[in-house]
Image: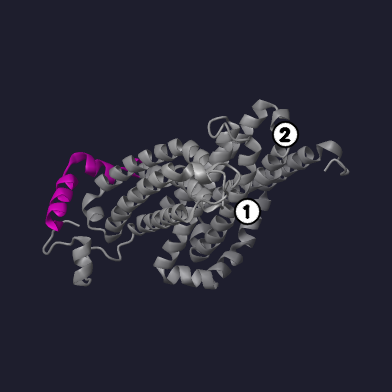
Amino acid sequence: MSNSILGPYTRTIVTIGFIILVFGFSFTNFRSDMYVVIFPFFEWMETTWFGIIGKTWGAAFAFVQTIHLLGLALLGGSVLAAEGRILGLLMVDVPAKTIVNRCHTLLSWSLIITISTGVFMACGVALKIYYLPVFWYKMLALMAGVMFHFLVRRPLLEHDLETINPIILRMTAVSSILVWFLVAATGRWIGFSG
Amino acid sequence: MNELIYGVAVWLDDTTYSALLHESYYMYNWVESTHVLTLMVSLGMLFLIDLRMLGYAFPDVPASKIADRLFVPMIIGFVIMFITGILLFYAVPVRSAQSLWFRIKMVLLIACAVNAFVLHRRMSKSVSSWDQDSRAPSRIRVGAWLSLGFWSVVVICGRFIAYDWLDCIRDQPALIDFMAGCIDGQTRY
């Protein structure tokens, strides 16, 4: 990234630009226009095999939801183990880099499980979740979590942890816990909104 | 036995706090959400420990260290889940006590506890010989697989409790009625 046209602050500039784009999207008519444009996609989701299976057999939907929960458990465990290590609360006698790298692998797998099962579930209730504000909050939180983890946290933690400002490290760890907790909580909230 | 369980459940159902909890707009949701979200703590830590035994996580960290360091947060998570689980049962005691999924879940929780005890004992006796290995010996791995399997079915059964497919209010085979603890002529569901 230091060889890019934007120089050594490429990631910072890209992040700020992305935040500006998100605000521009959120507070202009573009958001409501896009909301109407994606409606046919949600209609189509319910006609897919996933949608038909999810709507016809409640047991299949519930079973996939359970796999989603188990993936969430693995995600929670990997996040708490890694951030607990960074915050000096867990496994302090194990090198932090080891814990962080191993947990990254586990988090990646748990994301694959939760996102794939989430897509299946979404197909089964596509038109319901289209009208649910909390579903969109969850998607925002998920997008924030994925981007934060892969574009901010992971590149930061590739450096030697001793060279990173301890306050920045702790803020990163706490932010990671909060954003993934937000994803889980909004997901639970969907269950109460139906 | 089923009559006894039904009697106790009806007695609990008649208590004031059971009705308050069941009919509360926010409290029940908070308790249930805490029960589900604490999965991330308790089962998350447990999965890391089991995956370490199987060689799929932290293969370069001593197994005993993973088990020791993650034990406390796992127990904290389980205590919270236990308390919220009792509250959830207390809110809807009759339906919960007569839910086949709930009964299977309770049996499996006992199986999980027994498996954890056996696994812990086996580990304590032998860990010094394989602690640095990326995978535990086969006897420990079997325990880890059983742990993962039992807990996965616990979560499945917990999710299925919400569905009324096998509830006593429905017409179903006598065996299901017996296993779920349905009582002939019961007036409370």
Q: Nearer the viewer, residue A135 or B36?
A: B36
Task: Out of A56 and A100, give the one closest to the viewer.
Answer: A100
* Number of numbered discs overlaid on the protein picture: 2
Residue span colored magenta: B1-28
The picture places residue B8, in percent across and down from the top left corner, at 15, 48
Position above or below: A149 against B6: above
- Whether A126 is drawn above or below B107: the answer is below
What element does badge 1 sit on?
helix
Name the residue that disc number 2 marks: A160
Residue most toward the front? B129
User: Subunit of mark 2?
Assistant: A
In magenta segment, residue B38: no
- Front one among A59 and B23: A59
Amino acid identity at mark 2: Asp
Which residue: 53% across, 40% down?
A: A80
Sequence-wise, the earlier of marks 1 and 2 is 1
At x 62%, y 61%, the residue is A38
**Quarter of the rendering occupied by the C terminus of chain B:** bottom left
Q: CB of mark 1 within 8 Å of CB of mark 2?
A: no
The image's colour scheme reads one colour
**Which residue is denoted by mark 1 in the rendering?**
A32
Could you tell me which chain the residue with mark 1 belongs to? A
Residue B146: x %, y % from top left:
41, 56
Q: Secondary structure at mark 2?
A: loop
Instruction: Kindly report which numbered mark, 1 or 2, lies closer to the viewer in this rendering.
Output: 2
Q: Is residue B49 left or right of residue A140?
A: left
Visible in this render: residue B117? yes
**Mark 1 residue type:** Ser
- Quarter of the rendering occupied by the N terminus of chain B: bottom left
Q: Is residue B163 left or right of residue A172?
A: left
Left or right of residue A25, residue B140 in this image? left
Task: Note whether A4 is above or below A65 in the view shown.
Answer: above
